Each structure stands twice: as structure tokens, then as C-alpha cells.
Amino acid sequence: MSDLKNIHEEYTTKLKENLSSDQINQIKSDLFGKNGLISSQFKTLGSLNENERKQFASELNKIKDELQKTISEKLKELELKKINEKLENEKIDINLQERPIVRGKIHPVSQTIDEISSIFSEIGFSVEEGPDIENQYNNFTALNTPDYHPVRDMHDTFYLDEQKEILLRTHTSPVQIRTMLKDKPPFKIIAPGRTYRSDSDQTHAPMFHQVEGLHIDKDINMGHLKGCLNYFIKEFFEVDKIKMRFRPSHFPFTEPSAEVDIGYEIKDGKIVIGEGDQWLEILGCGMVHPNVLRNVKVDPEKFQGYAFGIGIERLAMLKYGINDLRAFFECDYRWLNHFGFDPLDVPTNYRGLSRWK
């Protein structure tokens, strides 16, 4: 019995030490192996009488259970420590990195529309809008466009029905018709927006942006038109002087009609708008045809006016040195980051229209 107590005390003390798993397994083998100390004690039970055997077996099982429990706890403790060390060394950060704040840029078309609106608002024009999907009356008939005019053909216009009654507007002039039908003169509006034509190359796109202007009042003449456009062109291109000429042209909705050219010159490979010896067409205009006024119930004997239409992408290309119209619609972030504008830099005539770098 004394040997049993000695074994218990000795190995209980050993198991309290800082042991490795190999050392603990060696102790386990020493105690419970085939010829281990505890296993050997069980072999002596047969040599004892019945009373001694019961007492000795009870004490032996108690010590065996205690030592096995201690060994098992020590091995679990070491295994848990090993797992924790492994997790610490192989730690994976599952937290998402903070995304950098990337401030977007205003598209050159949107910026140009804001610049145009700012300029015309300074001389009393208001902004009107209308739907992209139009009927043929507002888009053609009310604007004095005859049935045989080639612009009505399918190779020029996107029709949405077989009867050719519903279409994608080919200009923003229908906004003028809608405005004049719902209100009474005088009118002084601009109508910026998307327009659609069946055309696509380096300088044309099937969808593009226009701004059209309309001024209807008593005693309006070509002099008012010229003064308005002269003011606009100088303000938009931010120049003090501008050479401008009116060339006779033809549009169904204006009479007389004209194309407007501005002077420019080439400096260091760039177009410089101003007083050069070369000419560049930028817009079409004219006095509103009397038939258009009659179609919207306005008496052409009392009221006259002028109208003009400008391609917004064309103005942006000239002002900001963009040489391919298709780039406006390619959604290239690098291009937008270069040609785009600060979203907080709202154009005004007082602060400056554009601060493009």
C-alpha cells in the first residue's frame, strides 16, 4: 500500500511541472503501459486475501482514476495551447479594409449644359424640358416640316411604331411647341436635352445633346437674335471679342434662316476661338416661321421671334479640346477623370463658368 501511495505522490508532483506532450505520454506509458507501475499493481491482487484485495483494489482504482484524469487534463491543456498558438500565428484579419473615398467628376456634357443655362439665365431665359419620346406632330408637322421632307425618313429618324406616329425626338424643338401650346406669349426659353438621329461616326452619334432657344415677343427682329448669340458666344468661350458671321441657310421652321460661323485660329496645335482668319460653324438659327406660330395659336401679325439650336457636345469639344465625339459615351473613367469637373464648382457668370484644368 505504501508503494502505491509513493507512486501517486511522485507522479502527481511530476504532472504539476511544465511538461511537453511527449513527456506526459511517457508518464502515461510508465504508469499504465503493459508493464507500467499501476498495471503491475493490478497483477498483485491475486496474491492477497479477500479483505486486503477489496481494500487494495479500491485504493488502486482511486489512484488510477486520479492519475488518468490529471494526465488527460494536461494533454488537453497542451493541445488547446498548441491550437491557440497556431491560430495566433496564422491569424487572418476578416475585417474589410476601409475603402478610399473617390470623389466623382461632373461629365463635360452636364457641365456644358450648366454653363449654357447659366449664361442664358442672365439675360432672362428660363429652362424648359420635355419627353424624349414624341409624336410626329410636335416633332415635325407643328414645326412646318412637310410630309415629303427627307428628315422624316426612317434612315434619319428612330420611329417606335409602324404608323410612324411615335418617335424619339430628333431635336428639342418639340419642347418649344409644348411650351407655346400650354402658355401665352411672350416666350423666352431654352430647351436642353437628349436627341436621337440615325447617324454615327467620329463627329456624329445616334444620341446626342442639344439646346434650343426661343424668344417670342412683339417687335423681335434679327438684330435681337444677333445680339443674343454674340453675348452667348463671348460668355461661353470666355473671350472679350468674337468674329461672327451669318450665312444664309434653310430650315423648315425658320424664315429667314442662317448658319452661324465664328472666327478662330490655330496656336500651338490648338483651336483658339476669337478673331482668327478661319471660320467654324457652331449653330443654326433664324426667325420663327409664321406657320409655326399659327400651329400653336399665336398670331404672327402681333408676335415675332427667333430660334436657334446648338449641339452641346460640339461646344464642349471646341472649348475643352475633345477631338472624338464617341468618347463622351464610352464610360471610360480615365477620360472622365481628365475632362470632368469638380462637382462643387457650379458655373455662374460671377464666379466663372468653368475651372477646367
Image (spheres, helix red, strand yellow):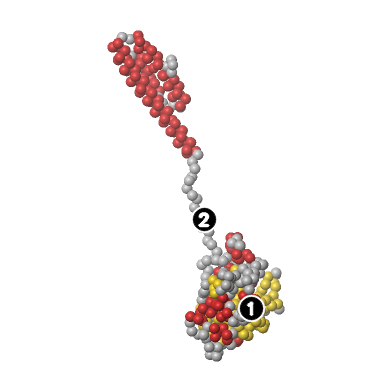
Residue at point 57%, 79% (across, down)? 141
Going from the N terminus, do you reach mark 2 or mark 1 first? Answer: 2
Splitting the image into 4 quarters, where does residue 33 fall? top left
Label 1 CA crowd tier, 10 Å (few <14, some 14–19, many 20+): few
Could you tell me residue 262's position as x and y percent?
A: 66, 78
Say which of 304 and 53 sits in front: 304
Residue at the disc numbered 2 = 100
Say which of 126 and 22 sits in front: 126
Label 2 CA crowd tier, 10 Å (few <14, some 14–19, many 20+): few
Looking at this rendering, what residue extends furthest in the left direction? 51
**In the displayed structure, would residue 106 be above or below residue 178?**
above
Three-letter amino acid code of the residue under disc 2? Pro
**In the displayed structure, would residue 351 be above or below residue 12?**
below
Could you tell me residue 345's position as x and y percent?
A: 53, 69
Q: Quadrant of the C terminus?
A: bottom right
Circle 1 SS class: loop
Could you tell me residue 61's position as x and y percent?
A: 34, 19
Looking at this rendering, what residue extends furthest in the front direction? 163
Three-letter amino acid code of the residue under disc 1? His
Q: Is residue 180 visible?
A: yes
Q: Quadrant of the N terminus?
A: top left
Q: Which mark is residue 233?
A: none
Residue mark closest to the camera, 2 vs 1? 1
For the residues labelled 2 and 1, the Cα–Cα distance comes to 55 Å
Splitting the image into 4 quarters, where does residue 267 fall? bottom right
Q: How many marks?
A: 2
Residue at the disc numbered 1 = 149
Circle 2 SS class: loop
**Does residue 295 appear left or right of residue 54 in this picture?**
right
